[in-house]
Amino acid sequence: MSPLSRSLIIAIIVFTFCSNIAGQNQISREWKQIDADGKFSFYLPLNMRETGVIGIENYHKEYTNGKLHVSFDYEPMEVIGYPVRPGTLGKNLKEIVFEVDGKKAYMFQYETTDARKRPLYVADLYIGDIPNREIKLRMYFETWNPANLKIAETIFRSIRFKSGPNQEN
């Protein structure tokens, strides 16, 4: 291997390593970690605040900054019927299946309108076995700017479930 090739490989490794560190530091400086009563944690932009809305039937919280709205239901009692989702969710439905903290997750992105008939862009996440209606966590994200849907995916991918004697891993 020539010295030039070796230098190029080292430069690529250093760049990759530094990029990963910079990405992690960016989230830790510009985002805050939310602990959901010891059940799980996730990150939100620093300017998001809790709305004070709480759940009655399950553990529910909501956060907003006026431009983004995030809510979650831990072990929700009501879950959308998987076969009927194309007819019940909004326009331009896109389904993305991936893993969150080692668990299967379904994200539905779609367009709808708010109470003032303005376009609203939604990312709706279900972690668990949605076809069999066994959901561990549902997290809902809405915004008026479709570019903000990338923020939703970052929030969703930051979810980490706690493990312990009373928690499933």
Image (spheres, rainbow, N blue to C red):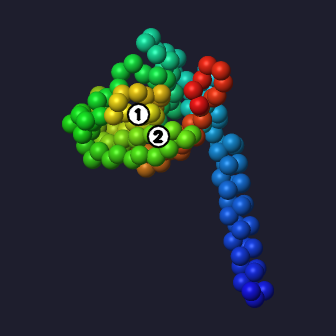
In three-dimensional space, the C-alpha distance between marks 1 and 2, rounded to whole angstroms, equals 7 Å
Q: Residues within 10 Å of mark 2 (few under 14, many from 20)?
A: some
Q: Residues within 10 Å of mark 1 (few under 14, many from 20)?
A: some
The residue labelled by disc 2 is: 104
* Residue 49 rendering spot, x and y as whole percentages: 56, 27
* Residue 168 rendering spot, x and y as whole percentages: 57, 26
Name the one closer to the observer, 45 or 125.
125
Q: Quadrant of residue 8?
A: bottom right
- The answer to whether one can see residue 11 in this image is yes
* Residue 88 rendering spot, x and y as whole percentages: 24, 33
Examine the rendered structure and indicate whether residue 154 appears above or below residue 42.
below
Q: Is residue 116 left or right of residue 15?
A: left
Assign a secondary structure to mark 1: strand
Examine the rendered structure and indicate whether residue 34 appears above or below residue 95.
above
The residue located at (35%, 30%) in the rendering is: 132
Marks 1 and 2: CB-CB under 8 Å?
yes
What is the number of the mark on residue 139? none
The residue labelled by disc 1 is: 129
First-in-chain label (1 vs 2): 2
Q: Which residue ends up furthest to the left in the rendered image? A: 87
Examine the rendered structure and indicate whether residue 16 appears above or below residue 84.
below
The residue located at (70%, 48%) in the rendering is: 25
